[in-house]
C-alpha cells in the first residue's frame, strides 16, 4: 500500500513539474512575440454602419430613424472592431487562452473587457486578433470624447487630414490560468 502511495505521489510531482515547465515554455514563447495595431473596422452606431456615411446628407430616413429611436431609449450602442496583429518569431506556435484588454482614445479609457477565446499565433508567422468594442455612446457622452470618436472615425474613413487620433490598446494575455504580470501597450496614431 505504501509503495502505491509513494509511486502515485512521485507521479503527481512529476506531472506538476512537467505542467509547470510547459506553462513556462509557453509563456517564454509568447513573451518573444510582438503585437502591432492592424486597424479598426466595422464602425456602427445603433447598428447603422458608418462606412457609407461621409456627411449628414448620406444618412437615409431608415438609418436616421434607427439612430433617433436608440437615442430616445437612452441606450445607443457604438461598436467597432480593433484588430491586433500578433507576430511570432519562434519555432513553436504561441498560444493565448484568454485576453484582457483596455482600449484608450487620446489617453482616455473608453472600454475594457476580456476575450475568453483561444488564439494561436503560428510558428514563424502572424495572426490577427479582433477585439469587438461595444459601448453605450451615451455613457461616454462628453464633448471631448465624442469629438475624439468622431475624429477617429473621420481618420479611419479617410475624411480627415487635419488631426491624427491616438488609439492605445493594452492587452494582458493568460496561458493556462497564468496571467502576464503587466499589460502590453500598443500605441498607434491614425
Image (cartoon, helix red, strand yellow):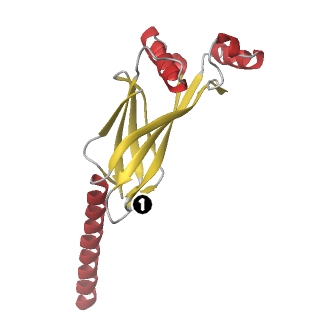
Q: Residue at x 40, y 20 (%)?
A: 164
Can you identify the residue that label 1 sits on? 122
150 up-or-down from 126: above or below? above
Numbered marks: total: 1
95 up-or-down from 186: above or below? below
Where does the N terminus fall, quadrant-wise? bottom left
Where does the C terminus fall, quadrant-wise? top left
Q: Few, some or many C-alpha atoms within 10 Å of disc 1 (few <14, some 14-19, many ≥20)?
A: some
Q: Is residue 172 left or right of residue 2?
A: right
Q: Residue at x 44, y 16 (%)?
A: 148
32 up-or-down from 91: above or below? above
Picture coordinates of residue 166, whole percent (x, y): 37, 24
Q: Is residue 177 left or right of residue 151?
A: left
Q: Residue at x 36, y 21 (%)?
A: 106
Picture coordinates of residue 18, whole percent (x, y): 27, 72
Q: Residue furthest top?
A: 143
Place residue 88 in its image quadrant: bottom left
Place residue 80 in its image quadrant: top right
Q: Residue at x 30, y 69 (%)?
A: 19
Which of the two residues, 36 or 144, is positioned nearer the viewer here? 36
Q: Residue furthest front?
A: 161
Which of the two residues, 40 or 24, is positioned nearer the viewer here? 40
Q: Secondary structure at mark 1?
A: loop
Place residue 178 in its image quadrant: bottom left
58 up-or-down from 118: above or below? above
Amino acid at each position: 500500500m505504501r509503495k502505491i502511495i509513494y509511486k502515485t505521489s512521485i507521479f503527481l510531482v512529476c506531472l506538476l513539474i512537467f505542467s509547470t515547465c510547459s506553462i513556462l515554455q509557453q509563456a517564454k514563447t509568447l513573451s518573444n512575440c510582438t503585437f502591432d495595431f492592424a486597424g479598426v473596422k466595422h464602425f456602427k452606431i445603433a447598428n447603422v454602419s458608418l462606412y457609407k456615411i461621409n456627411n449628414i446628407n448620406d444618412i437615409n430616413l431608415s438609418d436616421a430613424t434607427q439612430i433617433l429611436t436608440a437615442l430616445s431609449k437612452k441606450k445607443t450602442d457604438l461598436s467597432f472592431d480593433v484588430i491586433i496583429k500578433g507576430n511570432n518569431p519562434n519555432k513553436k506556435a504561441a498560444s493565448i487562452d484568454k485576453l484582457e484588454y483596455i482600449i484608450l482614445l487620446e489617453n482616455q479609457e473608453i472600454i475594457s473587457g476580456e476575450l475568453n477565446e483561444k488564439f494561436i499565433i503560428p510558428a514563424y508567422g502572424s495572426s490577427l486578433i479582433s477585439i469587438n468594442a461595444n459601448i453605450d455612446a451615451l455613457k461616454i457622452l462628453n464633448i471631448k470624447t465624442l469629438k475624439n470618436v468622431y475624429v477617429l472615425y473621420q481618420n479611419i474613413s479617410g475624411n480627415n487630414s487635419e488631426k491624427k487620433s491616438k488609439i492605445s490598446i493594452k492587452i494582458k494575455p493568460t496561458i493556462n490560468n497564468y496571467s502576464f504580470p503587466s499589460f502590453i501597450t500598443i500605441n498607434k496614431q491614425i
